[in-house]
Image: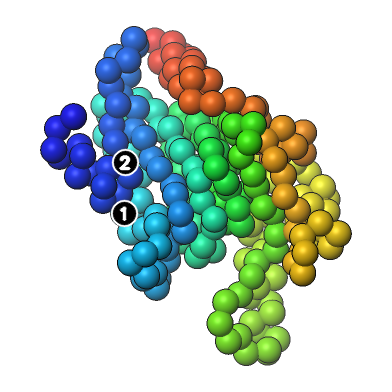
Amino acid sequence: MEQEEIKKIEESGQLDLEENAFGYKIHLLNIIGEIEGHQCLGPGTKTTKYEHVLPELAKVEEDSRIDGLLVLLNTVGGDVEAGLAIAEMIASLSVPVVTLLLGGGHSIGVPLSVCGNHSFIVPTATMVVHPIRMNGTVLGVKHNYEYIDKMQDRIISFTCNHSGIEERELKKIMFNTKELAKDVGSVLVGPEAVDAGLIDEVGGIQQAFSFLYSLINEEKNSTI
């Protein structure tokens, strides 16, 4: 592996793969740790920085040599607006996109897990689905509550539009008061996320690549 590629992985967790049987160029995007938004997190925190991800996604869209995108996720969530911005941008790409949830896809990691054309989850991965949480001091005024409600609606709408779950079922899972100690929400493990309609299939890296190649083949054959 060239030094430039190693540096790219270290800085942004992204890499271009093209040594496969089809000769396709696949862009690999890692979304790990905490999604960092407008505020920088501590040096000891693993983060995905949206100012790194968004330009790379623009490159994926504009670089005619890139045939598809594989997104690997293991995130605890983080900044809601930054996470949703990344999810919206991935969903708007014209190249085929497959997402693979590995360790966890919690909080804003939920819409990020479903933003592609097809989603996979490994059997032991978890999704913690809960309402928006606000950190720090929040003024208890009507405007703030309205903003939180609108942001919550955006997350629910996006998730339902990009997965097989119905809004009523998602809200039932999200606002569950019987599962998490001292909190609201639900924990879904692997197959449970598929049964709920959030994720398309249980599978790993081989299945994710195989499905991505099939999407690319289908797209290229349709343009011949």
Q: Cβ–Cβ below 8 Å for labels 1 and 2?
A: yes
Residue beneath label 1, please?
52
How many angstroms separate mark 1 from mark 2 (CA)?
10 Å
Q: In which quarter of the image is residue 133?
A: bottom right
Q: What is the basis of the colouring in this image?
A: rainbow
Q: Which amino acid does label 2 sit on?
A: Gln
Residue beneath label 2, please?
14
Side of 131 where 90 appears, left or right: left
Q: Which residue lies furthest to the left in this view?
A: 3
Q: Which residue lies furthest to the right in this view?
A: 178
Q: Is residue 84 above or below residue 18?
A: below
Mark 2 residue crowding within 10 angstroms, few (<14) / some (14–19) / many (20+): many
Kindly tell me whether residue 84 is visible in this rendering.
Answer: no
Side of 26 where 106 appears, left or right: right
Foreground label between 1 and 2: 2
Residue 136 on image: x %, y %: 56, 82
Q: Which of 99 and 104 is in front in this view?
A: 104
Q: Which of 189 and 218 is in front in this view?
A: 189
Kindly tell me whether residue 68 is visible in this rendering.
Answer: yes
Residue 8 on image: x %, y %: 23, 44
Residue 46 on image: x %, y %: 40, 57
Considering only order in the chain, which callout, 2 or 1, is on the residue closer to the N terminus? Answer: 2
Q: How many labels does the image show?
A: 2
Q: Which mark is residue 74?
A: none
Q: In this view, does 116 lie above or below 144?
A: above
SS for tag 2? Answer: strand
The quarter of the image holding the N terminus is top left
Residue sitting at 40 percent across and 62 percent down? Answer: 45
Residue 94 on image: x %, y %: 43, 34
